[in-house]
Image (cartoon, rainbow, N blue to C red):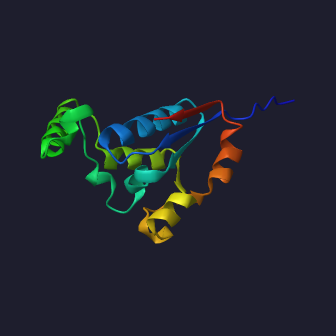
């Protein structure tokens, strides 16, 4: 008789449309899939822009603290960060999203955020599922790992 253990599941919440908001959820979700886990990334608030058509390429890096408030600093910091990413051989956010979807990572958009921002389901890249917070939590409660990245 075959012993079928239920597959382990994990979720990651992405609430920022910045480089440091998008990368952790994608990298963790891809690696979770490679470990045989089901992986979901729940995009909410500004993070929802990452899964909008053309949105992942617009992710910026905003330095923390007062540096981030200096006019033009975000553009300079973003260029520097993108250069470091390229030099390190790290895939872009666009490339990681494609890899994630090919490897079976599920992308979920928050219904409340969609309504709040006046978005439509066809504003998103292909393969995005829309869930309410309640639907997300029904899934997350059975997950082994839940992380806010």
Quadrant holding the N terminus: top right
Say left or right for 57 vs 41: left
Q: Is residue 127 visible?
A: no
Q: Is residue 114 visible?
A: yes
**Residue placed most toward the observer, 74 or 80:** 74
- Relative image position of residue 115 (x, y in whole percent): 52, 66
- Relative image position of residue 42 (x, y in whole percent): 53, 47
- Relative image position of residue 25 (x, y in whole percent): 45, 38
Residue at horizontal 67%, vertical 45%? 137
Number of numbered discs = 0
Residue at horizontal 66%, vertical 35%? 143
- Relative image position of residue 111 (x, y in whole percent): 56, 60
Q: Is residue 31 above or below residue 42?
A: above
Q: Is residue 56 above or below residue 31?
A: below
Quadrant holding the C terminus: top left
Q: Is residue 52 above or below residue 78?
A: below
Residue at horizontal 43%, vertical 40%? 26
């Amino acid at each position: 008789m075959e012993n079928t253990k239920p597959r382990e599941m994990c979720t990651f919440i992405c609430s920022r449309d910045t480089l440091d908001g998008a990368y952790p959820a994608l990298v963790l979700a891809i690696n979770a899939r490679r470990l045989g886990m089901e992986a979901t990334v729940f995009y909410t608030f500004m993070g929802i822009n990452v899964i909008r058509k053309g949105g992942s390429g617009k992710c910026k890096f905003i330095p923390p603290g007062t540096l981030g408030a200096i006019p033009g600093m975000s553009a300079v910091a973003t260029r520097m960060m993108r250069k470091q990413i390229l030099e390190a051989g790290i895939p872009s956010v666009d490339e990681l999203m494609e890899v994630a979807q090919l490897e079976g990572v599920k992308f979920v958009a928050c219904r409340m955020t969609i309504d709040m921002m006046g978005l439509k389901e066809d504003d998103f890249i292909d393969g995005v599922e829309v869930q309410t917070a309640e639907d997300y939590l029904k899934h997350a409660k059975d997950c082994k790992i839940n992380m806010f990245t």
